[in-house]
Amino acid sequence: TKDEIKHIVLCCAGFADDHQIFMKYASDLSKREKNTLVGVISFPGYDHRPDFPWTKHKRDGYTFEEWILSMKDAVKLLRKEENRMNSNGKKAKFTAVYHDWGVVYGLKYTNRVIEESSTDLIPDKVVLFDVLTSVHPKCKNVPSNVPAQSRYQIIVEHLYRVLLAVSFWIGRYVSSLLAPFVLVIGFSILGLIQLSPLYDEVDGKISRIPKVIVFDDMRRLVYMAHPYYYFLCSAVNSAFAKKLKDGMSLPLNLERTPILYMYGTDKPCDFHDLTALQLLKDTSSCKVVSVPDAGHYLYIQQPQICLDEVIQFMNN
């Protein structure tokens, strides 16, 4: 466009997706909302290109600081392109869109740049797709009388996370040949006993978890489970847990950094903290939208609803 850039948007994918999962949504967003510059990134270590295959990534995955650094680099590139296109020097509004593990990674980034007062890097608004972490530890208006999670929800959430973490550990420290089969057998059992976190008929066609064992794909999937391994380690190491969870919450000032949280209703369990969910509902600058006929990949399953809500949120 010859006009000035008014919005920049960064979309960050989660487990187990590279940047391509967001490309269609990002393209549609840039076409719908004129004068918008949209970037797409994936979780560090999740990309796989002919010139840089996944096997060249660090064997143990990437550190928390590297998560944050990778997103800083992405936002700086968008700002650089914005400056090239905006000759008048005006700054575009920045909206960050995070999905799945991108939420964890993205909120750590968001809280860090707020803490550092890095003005050009701080999102003006944040969109969370299908994952919602906890309330900021310094929040003074934490909602009360929030219902507890059901036992079923707790069991489902923990089982698949432990399975992914153990599979990564086996692949890294025991046998890279054995780990893919442990993962496939484990997910098959969870499906049979109805403890899988997703419905195959809703999310199965989109999820990267293969239905047919292709060994190289399974080895890559095992590698991409390294964030789950970090979480398992945090359960037995309090110092590591503090470092992992630092900055993983919602921002403290939700008036300054408004949140739009959207989630699909067609899943065996939800991936949101119920206290945080109520806080967003109680905060006038924030919004919660449940999306019918959609599961974990709601922005693919119901793209028009997600586009409409995000564009309205950006311009509100």
Image (tube, grey):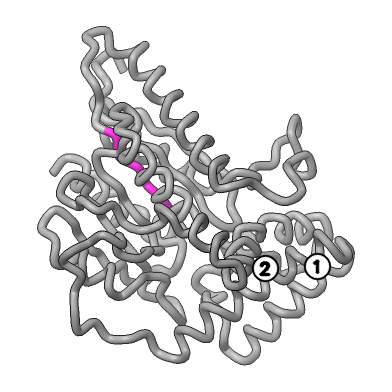
Disc 2 is placed on an element classified as helix
* Magenta stretch, residue numbers: 94-98
**Is 198 located above or below residue 29 in the figure?**
below
**Magenta segment, prevailing SS (helix, strand or loop):** strand
Quadrant for residue 44, please give it: top right
Sort mark 1 into few (<14), some (14-19) or many (20+) by Cα contacts within 10 Å: some
**Can you identify the residue that label 1 sits on?**
170
Which amino acid does the dot numbered 2 rest on?
Answer: Ala
Q: Is residue 96 magenta?
A: yes
- Nearer to the camera, 315 or 244: 244
Disc 1 is placed on an element classified as helix
Residue 165 badge = 2
Quadrant for residue 20, please give it: top right
**Is 251 located above or below residue 160 in the figure?**
above
**Is 55 located above or below residue 283 in the figure?**
above
* Residue 97 % position (x, y): 37, 47
Relative side of 48 to 248, left or right:
right
* Residue 9 % position (x, y): 35, 36
Quadrant for residue 228, please give it: bottom right
* Residue 311 % position (x, y): 24, 44
Relative side of 65 to 210, left or right:
left
Toward the top, the furthest residue is: 87
Which amino acid does the dot numbered 1 rest on?
Answer: Ile
